[in-house]
Image (cartoon, helix red, strand yellow):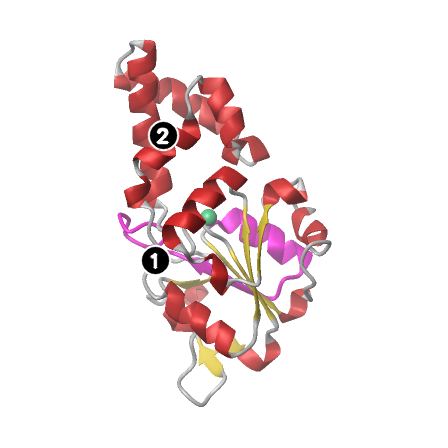
Amino acid sequence: MIIDWNDIDTVLLDMDGTILDRHFDDHFWLEHVPQRWAAHNRTTIEYAKEHLYGLFRSQENTLNWTDLDYWSDRLKLDIPLLKREIEHLIAVHPHVVEFLLFLKQHRKNVWLVTNAHSKTLDLKMKTTRIGPYFDGIISAHQVGLPKEDDRFWGKLQEFVNYTPERTLLGEDSETNLTTAQRFGIRYLIYISRYSSKITPRPSEHFQTVEYFNRLIPPQGTSTVSLISTNAGCPA
Ligand SMILES: [Mg+2]
């Protein structure tokens, strides 16, 4: 894929896993919540994990998945409070600020577009102070649909004025890249190093980068050439 930044006006970036380390979210839902739920319900952690993982899976691809009020009510735990207990794990991925500064310098319209709930967003913006780098922040809860829904990207245009053929989307969810592709967003980038704790693997369907600095062109030029990950080359 060749990216000529002269052809791009708008950049849409996902939050968890894309610009922030998903280790926080993975650790929170897979370890921290089961621990607290087990203590609260006097069960073993093994039982809590089995029970909760099943509940989580049942709400995948819906807005409930990221709705902290839904989970507080369903699990009878103060989920926002539990998040604050491990907020030291919230971290911005390497090279993200450098990329955001590049976008600002070139006057791109930059939006954070996330399925995250407003309470998660507040905590993460307060902890990372990354909000001011964006022209705006949109939660799927405002849009009323998750990004996994094909109708999301069209509905997003009621909130963000963007032309799909002149837009770049960065995501760590191949499902969301697929719905965006069906809507016609042209530049689709998969972030493979979504967590600091995983070994990244390129997508078989989408152009993959580990870090966003790969999208910054050499000084004085506007073009970046990316190795096609479909060709089986190491990314
Ligand atoms: Mg994500």
Q: CA distance from mark 1 to mark 2?
A: 22 Å
The image quarter containing residue 43 is: top left
Amino acid type, mark 1: His
List the single residue furthest toward the bottom.
220
Q: Residue at x 53, y 25 (%)?
A: 70
Amino acid type, mark 2: Leu
Residue 159 vs 80, above or below: the answer is below
Q: Residue at x 36, y 67 (%)?
A: 233
Earlier residue among tags 1 and 2: 2
Tag shown at residue 21: none
Residue 4 vs 116, above or below: the answer is below
The span picked out in magenta is 173-201
The verdict on residue 193 being magenta is yes
List the single residue furthest toward the top.
42
Q: Which residue is mark 2?
A: 82
Q: Nearer the viewer, residue 81 or 49?
A: 81
Q: Nearer the viewer, residue 205 or 129?
A: 129
Answer with left or right where residue 184 lies relative to residue 61: right
Is the residue marked 1 within 8 Å of ligand 1, measured from its CB?
Answer: no
Q: Which residue is mark 1?
A: 93
Tag 1 secondary structure: loop
Circle 2 packing at 10 Å, graded few (<14), some (14-19), many (20+), is some
Q: Residue at x 27, y 19 (%)?
A: 45
Residue 37 percent location from the top left of the image: 34, 18
Circle 1 packing at 10 Å, graded few (<14), some (14-19), many (20+), is many
Answer with left or right where residue 29 lies relative to residue 60: left
